[in-house]
Structures are given as structure tokens and as C-alpha cells.
Image: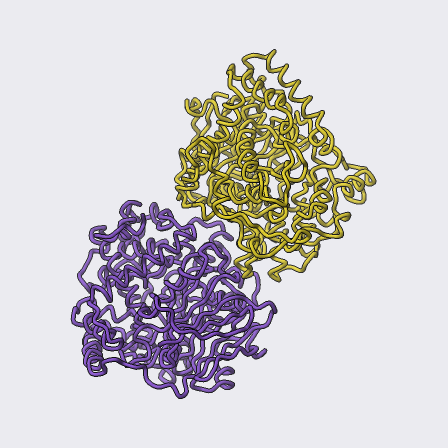
Chain colours: A yellow, B purple
Amino acid sequence: MNKFIRVDMTTLKVTTEKVPEKYVGLGGRALTSNFVNDEVKPTCHALGKNNKLIFAPGLLSGTTAPNSGRISVGAKSPLTGTIKESNAGGSFSQKMAKMGIKALVVEGIPADDKFYVIKIDGKRVTIDEAPAEILGGCGNYKAIEVLSGKYGEKVGIALAGPAGEYRLPSANISFKDPEGNIRSAGRGGLGAVMGSKKIKAIVIDDTGAGAVPIAEPEKFRAASKVFAKVILDHPVAGQGLAAFGTNVLVNIMNEAGGLPSKNFTTGRIDWNDNISGETVNATIKERGGDGKVSHGCHAGCVIRCSQWYPDKQGKYITSGFEYETIWGLGADAGIKDLDEIAYIDREMDDIGVDSIETAVAVAAAMEGGLLPWGDGKAVLDAVKQIAVPTPLGRLLGSGTEAIGKACGLFRVPVVKGQSIPAYDPRNVKGIGLTYATTPMGADHTAGYCIANNILSLGGFIDPLKKEGQVDISRFLQIGTASIDSTGCCLFIWFALADSPEGIQALVDMINAQYGLSLSVEEAVVELGKSVLKVERAFNKAAGFTNAHDRLPEFFEYEPCAPHNLVWDFTPEEIDEVYNFEGEEALNS
Amino acid sequence: MNKFIRVDMTTLKVTTEKVPEKYVGLGGRALTSNFVNDEVKPTCHALGKNNKLIFAPGLLSGTTAPNSGRISVGAKSPLTGTIKESNAGGSFSQKMAKMGIKALVVEGIPADDKFYVIKIDGKRVTIDEAPAEILGGCGNYKAIEVLSGKYGEKVGIALAGPAGEYRLPSANISFKDPEGNIRSAGRGGLGAVMGSKKIKAIVIDDTGAGAVPIAEPEKFRAASKVFAKVILDHPVAGQGLAAFGTNVLVNIMNEAGGLPSKNFTTGRIDWNDNISGETVNATIKERGGDGKVSHGCHAGCVIRCSQWYPDKQGKYITSGFEYETIWGLGADAGIKDLDEIAYIDREMDDIGVDSIETAVAVAAAMEGGLLPWGDGKAVLDAVKQIAVPTPLGRLLGSGTEAIGKACGLFRVPVVKGQSIPAYDPRNVKGIGLTYATTPMGADHTAGYCIANNILSLGGFIDPLKKEGQVDISRFLQIGTASIDSTGCCLFIWFALADSPEGIQALVDMINAQYGLSLSVEEAVVELGKSVLKVERAFNKAAGFTNAHDRLPEFFEYEPCAPHNLVWDFTPEEIDEVYNFEGEEALNS
């Protein structure tokens, strides 16, 4: 990966440069975050001409390393105002890597009001006017069909859906997956940045590209084999996720009393069977047809947590039917019918909005009287309005914080403007520290303490107590920043948490690919810390302080059933998360 | 003023205490800001139970000092997240002062969903359930009628309109004026704080109250006479404002090229005659009937800048028909018909929303395609929807920043979440520094550099150049913080700017009332600085940094006609505003 492509949308000019020296060793999130911190003015308007959008494959993307096909996207977030990295599956990352493209950077804003398609192939980068039929509310499923028809069935596609076109803060970037379905870089409104730059889609055609060069192929193969075995042998990563998908967590979190329900007013429901992973699995099997209980979001995935959920006639409704989406529309918004949830999930993918942000916003809108509690039909109708967009659609597409303002709520579950996902921080305390302190705004994937608190992976830490949580949130945030830089799916962590051998194999693959001899300390710990430091530096310059590393106040005085705990970390304790031992404190 | 009344809405209990020693010498904004900084947790949710709402008369309120009848209201703002003081005319301040009430503090939130009326008279404070007929969208004009009917025609009233009931971020607090019309503590959403505490209205009956005690009546009378003469003799304060109202500024600002138009895309219009002060004046005279070209918003006002604007039949439409409102709906939103603007102004008063926030939001909504440019009928209909509230009404009532998010705009004229008013900072540079740095969010009244930049009062400073602007914004912000603490209308500044004698008379009145011997340095400069320091301290603890003391980025790269200037102060230059000479820098 020796190319750095810049597309200037102000002049509609493309330049290809050699990868700047300082970025050579970086990939994925490490690259996007360093780049954004280097080139984007922290106080710029996220939708203005001075924001930049960067797409970067991970260090291992395009190789045969299992689960390494995720694409990182970075920019200043219009939702949070922080630096943002969001990653997704699909084929985009692997195609970029195979074509030797380390990063694609989009800058500027066109003077006219047209939307464009950026087309990248082995010979050139072109900027075409977007076909009219995919603009103005056209869903992503159809847009992928049209673009695949025009540019070839095998191309990779990154897409701003209707929400991105309208530059709504919850707009995601949708990626075509191997079957032509949708995988999303969901969080932080990066689709709105893409829309602000008038890019409807980026199409990548790797026809003719060779394999990613590997410095030491033998070593790579050996390490890759160990890595795959560690994952496949693991009860969660290798078996549990394939059997029930991420939605296996509904029953687990409900049992733990950490399933936030009815806009975060309780931690347990008694109708969990309606929406559990077991029920999803049984339904898919029973209905047959297009249904799949296990499927990968990108080529080379061995975890295969994704599922295809069909309707009663067996016809595909949606895939990537994740726990957090089902939790949000189910437990949090009270929709008890799985089919209704599936159709809303499909609609969110089709419009291109983050399903976490939107589901949490829906629940808040219910508390605010904008929507009736638990009414799946009303929600489907409201979500469809995002594509029009009506005032209700615009409001919903603005995210939970906006709903909170428009409805005058104090119970607004966001950190740094981004919705808190599917794990209640009062009854699962470790994850609360991650929500509060990650530079990304509330994000469970930034340091998934559920591993230790609930799944007993990497050492059990009692979710109801404060002891040990600061250390584990810090440790996981560092590790995650590294994994997000490799192109690997975060779920490899489930296996790696208890396997030094697996971590070593990951580093061995990087060393073998690039001809390096990095230690685990260097490739994982030091890299992770450096990424977090860069992200915190950007946020600090954008005006964020430790006062923003706090959960919403209601968690401090509204106890959460069934454990009836409140969020009781002091500001000083929270700030310890970013006090890297033996190092200058990040939050100094 | 020796009483401090606290109403706890959680328990519905009232306590009256002696004024805490530290607050004895403070009034108005000095008192509200010190109190909020002392008792409100900076990171609390503004609509949660830990925010507190304080009403405080100024130091001179209730006396015969000219123009001293303004009431200050303070809290953490749901619009900006900063500390907030907003003040208004009406009779509330004078009645509180005469009854010896230094401050009324409202705390907590009721457990039930009822709205209440707090009634204060000489014997007791009671908390009644609010009459059903004034709830759920009832306009302020009718609510004042109902409450006056129930509690007596002469009572003072503070009111949360429909917008306040719904806790919308642009909700103001409306005060009954001597004629039963409406004066507003407009900015920062304090009506939403009142609504969050389930207070529909506060009624004050000063029957039986004596005069405010004056330590040295002779000295007071003498100083008051000098003070009145200085104001009345001044061409702007004594004559211009009475003749044409604040709206005299339409032609002046248009001529100066600093009239922000079409959502801040230009600084001059060619249809200024449609909406000028001269036209308002001529229309009022021509229509007769209820029309008044000059009128005071509170008893004892000698400036009398308010006007009553009647319809074609001479029937009252609205009063307090201010320049900023007419500018916002007129120049900024393109509505060319004064009657349409007047009906929208009436509606905003009736619903209880800040007319600046709402007008600027309307213009942004037009740019965003939510409303048609310049269509007064569509705007009136949209504003009425705030009282329902429909999704569009909720969105509009959420303010300009929310509209910017929902419409994906980068041209969003706000600082710290509050709309920039009627003076373009590119072509009138001094006021830009005030917008950027005042602890209140964009607010022209916090340091009205238009005095020096445009009106040549207090020494002319060229509006198109940077020279001298930092010093004048700092000086005016300090002076304003003091004047806001006296209960005096800010417009006295026009006269005082060129009159050391007038400033001395103001301090002499305070000394005579309280038996003190403060110097001008102590009573104006030191007090003003101390208020600003307290406000900055609160904001800092709430998470604000110098990075928030910035104008929106588009001002830096979109030149403003006719002078085609951009906003070109560097961050370092801006930060000098709060570098108080000879003192520890406020922004350290």
C-alpha cells in the first residue's frame, strides 16, 4: 500500500502521491486519526469545506489474515464534534489494499449543487455525476443495484444514503458486502460529511490487482494459521457468535440486569424471549428460504456472526441484524415484534442512518411524546420520513441529543452527543467508563468491558462494583485502538483476551507482512496509546475537557433495577482512565 | 431587600431566610451569577432537578432611579449549557424590591406531572395548582388575563408560555408589563428551566408594601435628578430612541453594511425602507388607534423606546417591537411586510419564545429548505406550531443550532449554541468579539460595541478595522455586567458613555440608597470584572474553553458584502478580551 489518493471536491481534481513517510507504518484507525489530527482544523465546522474524510484499510487488510477486511473511515464528526473513526465490513478495504491504496482522502466542497460518484480502478480515478435515479431519497439497496449495474457486479461501493445526502448527524456510510447487501460505518455521522462533499458514492474496481505483497510469506502463513485456530477454538468467538449472532446478548444482558429498557429507566424486561438471539435463530431456521443463521460480513471472516433474517415467506428482510439494534428498538423502545424490528432495521440500512443512534433516539422520542411507546408501525413510518425528509424525519435523523432538546428531556442517554448503546452503565460499571472517556463519544466498541464484566473473558471483574473497572477500561481502549488499526474485526478480542498466543500471532502477521520485528508491547500497547493520545489531542483543541468525560447526570440519581445501583464513579476516578501508568497523563 | 425566598418544587415547601452575608451587596446579574456559580453544579443537566432558577431585582430596583426596574433571571441555560442571566422590564422587579425580596430561588422538580402557580404577597408564599385553562398551549396574553382576573389586576406576573411548558430551548420567561402586555427575559431558554420545575407562573402582589428604604434620601434625590437629566439630554437615549424605537437601527446598520441578511450571506439589502424605524413610526402615526410611538416597558422609564404597533384598523398587534426581531424576520429571513412581521412577533410573545433565537432559526430553516424564503404566512404558521407542538414546532423551538443540524448546514450563526443577532461581525468587528467571548453565548447586549463602532458614542472606533476593538469589547463587557446588576436598562449606557457625570450619579444613587461610599472604580469596574470572572469560572467547570470563544467558521471564509470583509481576528487576539489588564488573566 504505497498510494495516497486525494480528491479535491472544490476543484474536482485528483492527485496521487506517495504515502507520506510518517504514515507508512499506520493503517485503519491509527492512520485516520493521525491524519485528521494533522490536517483537519479541530474547530472547523464538520460540514464545512475544511473537514476532510479519509478511508483507510487496516494494516492486514487484503491479506489472508482471518477477519482483517474492515475499512476505517475518519473525519471530524458532525454528531459529536470530536475526532471520529468508524469501521465496517464489506469488500472496500480489501480492494483498496490489493490496489495498493493506503488511503483515500476527500477534501473541499463543490461550488455547484450536483452529487458525484468517485470511481477508482487500476488505471485512474474519475469523478462522474451521480445518476439521477439514485438521488433524492433513493434507498441504498436500489442504489447498490444501479451502481453495480453501471460499474460492474464485483465493484466495492461506499455510499451516502438519503440521510447522508441530507447531511443528517446520524447518517452512516454504507458499504456493499459480498452479496450486495449493506454493512455500515455507523457511528458519528460520517455519511453527513460524505454528503457535505457531494459524494453520493465511491466505487472501487480492483480488476487486475494482484495480491498484497508479503515480506515473509512462510512466517505469515504460519502465524495466520495459529491466529485462525485461536479464534475458531474459542467458545464465544468461534462458536457462540456463529450460532446465535451478537443478539445472543439479549438474554445474557437481561439476566445480568444491564439491558437498558424504556429509555434507560430499568435494566430488565420480562418479554426478552420475544427478541432474544435464541428466538431469532429459531425463527430463521423455521422460516428457511433466504434465512442464514451464520454468515460473514466480509471475505475471510471465520467468526461469521451475521445473520440473514427472512420474512414469513422466507424472503430476505435484513442482515447484520445486531444485538444493539434489536436491543434499541426492542427493550429500549418497547417494540415486542421481531418482524417489525427487522423491517425498521432494513429501513435504517436503506436510508443510511446509524441503527444505534436512531433506535435510542426513537426511545427518547417515545418518552418525549413524539411517538407512541412500543409502536413498531409508527416507528417504521417515522424512520421512512428521514428519507423524505419531513420535519419529524429530520429531527429523528439528528440523533438522540436533538430529540432530547426538542422534547425537553433530562433523561438523554448520550456522551459527547452520541447515544449510549445497549449496556447500562449503572449495573455494568466498566462499560460506563468507556462511554465516558473514549474520544469517540459513547461507544461500546471503544473498550468493550462487557468481555470482563459479563462474559468473564480476560478475567472476570464484578460488573456491580467499581474495583478493577478503571484499569480494564483503560486496557481495553488501548487494545481496541490497536485492533482497529489492523483491519481486524473487534470480535477477535474475545479469543485474544485469554490467549497470549493469539496476540503474538496477530503481531507476527504484521511483522511478516511488513518485514518488521515489532514486539507485542510496540505493536499493540504503544500503538494503541499513541492513537488515543492523538485523538485526545484533537478533541482538546476542539474544546473538549474532562468535564465532557462524564455520563449524563440522571445516571447519578436514578437507580437502575434490578440492582438499583446508580453511577457512582467520582470525576477523579473517571479521569484515572486516561492516566497512562508510567507516562505523562493524557488528560494533563 | 433583606429576604431570600426559596421554593423547593420537589417538596412544595417554601422557606424564607435572611439574605446570606455574601450576597448583601449584590443585585441583578451580580447576584444571579454568583448564586448560580455557588449552588448549581456546572455539569448538571439544565432541565434536571439540580438546576436552580433565581429571580433578582437590581440594586436600584423599586426606587425612583430612572429606568431601574429590570428583573434579572439566572440559571444554567438549556440552550447554551453556560451560566445565563437574562433580564426584562415589567413590574416584577419593582414589586419584589418594595417587598424586600432580594431573590426568589426555585429548586427541585415535582414528582407529579401538575403545573403550579407560585403566589407571593405580603403575608405568605403559596403554591397553587395552575388553572387548567392556561395550560397546554394557552397563549401568554390570555394567561395574563386569567391570572390577573384571579389574583388581581395590579399583580406582577412571570410566566412560562407554551414553549416553557414544553421545555423548549428557546423558551423565554414572559413578564406582565404595566399595561398587561408582555416583556421578555428572552435569551437562553430560561422559560424551559421554569417549565422543567413545573411552574406555569409566579404572581407577586405588593399590596401594602412601602417604599424601598433609602439611607440618605436627599443625596439620592439629587443624584437621581442628575442621572435623569444626563439621559434625557442625550441625542440617542433621550431623543432618538423615543422617536423611532430601537428599529431606527435598520437604516443605520444597512447603511453601515452590517445588517446580516439572508441567513448572514450579505450585509445590506435594497428594501430596507419596508422595515425601517422610520416606516414603523410613520405607520403607527398614520394608523392611530392603539398605536403608540413611544412608551416605557416599566414604570419610571424615561427613555421610552417601546412602541405599540397597531393593525390597519388601529387595533394593538404587538409592543416592544424591537430592531433585532424586525431585522431577523425582515432582513435575515426576507419577510418584506411589516404587518406580517408584527403578527409573528406577537405570536412569539404569546408562545413565549426568544424572538432573536426564533427569527434566526427561521432564516436558517429557509436556507435548509424547511420554509420558503421570505414567506411571512408560512413562518406565522410554523411559529404557531410551537404551541401545539408539532415536530416542526419542536424543531423551530429548539433554536438555530438544532435547525442547522437537522438541515445539515455549515452556515449556522451561533456562538455557544445561541444565535448571533442583528449586527454582522465581519463588517462591525467589535461586536464580533463580544459574541465570541461573552460567557452568555452570542449576545449583543453583553458588550454593545455598536455604540462605538456605529453610533460614535464613547469614542468612535472604525467598525471595519481590528484596531481598538479588543479593548472596547472588554471595557463594555465589564461595564455591562455592572449595569445589569443595578436593575437599570442597558440603554442608559448610550448617555453614560460620554458622561463621567452620569456614571458618577449612578454610583451616587447606589451609595445613597445603601449608605455606602463606593468609588466608580469599585461600583462599576471591580464589580463588573468580578461578575465576569464568576461567570467564566462556572463555564470553565461546565467544560467550556477558549476554543468555544470563537465565531462560526464560515465568517472566516465567506466575505460579507458590501465591504467584503471576513472575520480575521486570530484566536490569540480574541483571547486578549478576557486578559484583564493588571490582573490575573481570566482565561488562564
**Residue A15: % across, % down:** 43, 27
Report whether A340 appears left or right of A42: right
Residue drawn at point x = 61 percent, y = 49 percent: A426
Residue drawn at point x = 66 percent, y = 25 percent: A300
B115 or B411: nearer the eye? B115
**Residue A11: % across, % down:** 40, 35
B550 or B201: nearer the eye? B201
Q: Is residue B409 above or below residue B199?
A: above
Which residue lies most toward the bottom here? B208
**Does residue B376 appear in this view?**
no
**Does residue A321 appear in this view?**
yes
Which residue lies most toward the right here? A286
Residue drawn at point x = 67 percent, y = 44 percent: A346
**Residue A182: % across, % down:** 64, 37
Report whether B573 appears left or right of A338: left
- Quarter containing the C terminus of chain A: top left
Residue drawn at point x = 69 percent, y = 48 percent: A257
**Residue A103: % across, % down:** 49, 28
B221 or A572: nearer the eye? A572
